[in-house]
Image (tube, rainbow, N blue to C red):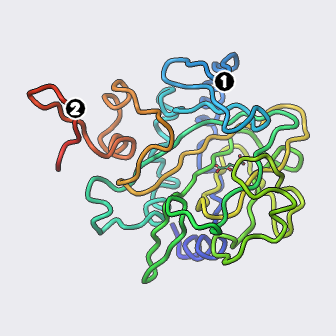
């Protein structure tokens, strides 16, 4: 984590880290994804759920992918990005971090084929507390910092993530939004929007972005699959985006540091049998 990383993330709202995932691990993650090839939306395999956000045209998500074995667990606190995330979520020396440093509120792999994309969404107008970008006294306080990990090479035609650099600080809605769409996940395209750029990545690179940045993806036109995983980090007091919860088996096998990020409050069972959060 360099001063330049800090400067560029503040300036642009996103940051690319090259070779953040070792090549052999990229191979293992892809083998793991291959094993889910037959999974369809609505089906479970173990603790991983096949899922679409709004429609099949956005490609299949494998929600709770951190349940799928050791390679996915490694990503929870990957040293290549965890210091960045701690810095950008911020609040580490405050009441915000009393139950832990961070919390992952959603984690999934996304597999897209030709014709698939996610529409443009987010941007700070209208403002959302959960996704906010905020800096106070030169300290970040972001509500949601996404780590989008390329598991395949993503170049022109591959359906790259698109961002409008610096839009996380914009005070007005993008005037072309109406031509594309206004609402999250309604399927409008970010391709061709003034100011939008494609983020090209090699397998193993990641892009970190604050969710308040206006973003989406280009439509994949090339054959084959675009494979990414996304872990979304926020403060430890956040809550799960979806009704999924980590399994007891996962919580049992994680290192204490990872467990804190996945489930900041340890569960305690009262003598009467009710389950509640531990007070620490
Ligand atoms: O699929 C992409 O490239 C964009 C991902 C996205 O919109 C998100 O993680 O919020």
Tag on residue 275?
A: 2
Q: Nearer the viewer, residue 153 or 92?
A: 92
Image mark count: 2
Q: Please tell me which residue lies in front, 186 or 83.
A: 186
Crowd rating for badge 2 (residues with CA inside 10 Å; few <14, some 14–19, many 20+):
few
Secondary structure state at the residue bearing disc 2: strand
Q: Residues within 10 Å of mark 1 (few under 14, many from 20)?
A: some
Determine whether 49 is above or below 129 in the image. above
Q: In what element is the residue under mark 1?
A: loop
Q: Give the residue furthest to the bottom.
A: 137
The percent coordinates of residue 123 (x first, y second) are 66, 65
Which image quadrant is residue 195 in? bottom right
The relative height of residue 72 versus residue 209 in the rendered view (above or below) is above
Say whether mark 1 is within 8 Å of ligand 1: no
Q: Which residue is mark 1?
A: 41
Q: Where in the figure is residue 155, as x and y percent of width and height? A: 83, 49
Label ID, residue 267? none
On screen, residue 145 versus residue 275, left or right, reads right
Q: Residue furthest left?
A: 271
> For the point 61% across and 60% down, which residue is it?
209
Residue 31 found in image quarter? top right
The residue under the point 72% across, 54% down is: 183
């Amino acid at each position: 984590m360099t001063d330049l990383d800090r400067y560029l993330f503040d300036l642009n709202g996103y940051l690319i880290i090259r070779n953040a995932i070792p090549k052999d691990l990229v191979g293992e993650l892809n083998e793991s994804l291959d094993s889910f090839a037959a999974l369809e939306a609505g089906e479970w395999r173990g603790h991983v759920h096949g899922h679409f956000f709004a429609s099949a045209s956005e490609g299949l998500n494998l929600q709770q992918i951190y349940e799928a074995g050791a390679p996915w667990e490694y990503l929870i606190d990957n040293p290549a990005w965890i210091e960045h995330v701690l810095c950008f979520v911020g609040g580490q020396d405050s009441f915000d971090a009393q139950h832990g440093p961070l919390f992952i509120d959603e984690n999934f792999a996304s597999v897209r084929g030709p014709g698939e994309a996610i529409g443009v969404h987010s941007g700070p107008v209208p403002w959302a507390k959960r996704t906010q970008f905020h800096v106070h006294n030169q300290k970040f306080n972001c509500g949601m910092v996404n780590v989008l990990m390329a598991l395949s090479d993503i170049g022109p035609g591959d359906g790259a993530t698109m961002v409008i650099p610096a839009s996380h600080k914009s005070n007005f809605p993008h005037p072309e939004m109406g031509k594309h769409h206004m609402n999250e996940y309604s399927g409008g395209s970010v391709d061709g929007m003034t100011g939008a750029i494609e983020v090209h990545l090699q397998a193993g690179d990641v892009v970190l972005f604050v969710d308040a940045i206006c973003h989406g993806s280009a439509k994949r036109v090339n054959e084959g699959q675009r494979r990414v995983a996304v872990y979304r980090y926020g403060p430890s007091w956040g809550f799960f985006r979806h009704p999924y919860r980590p399994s007891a088996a996962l919580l049992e096998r994680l290192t204490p540091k990872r467990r804190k990020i996945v489930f900041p409050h340890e569960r305690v069972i009262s003598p009467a049998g009710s389950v509640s959060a531990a007070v620490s």
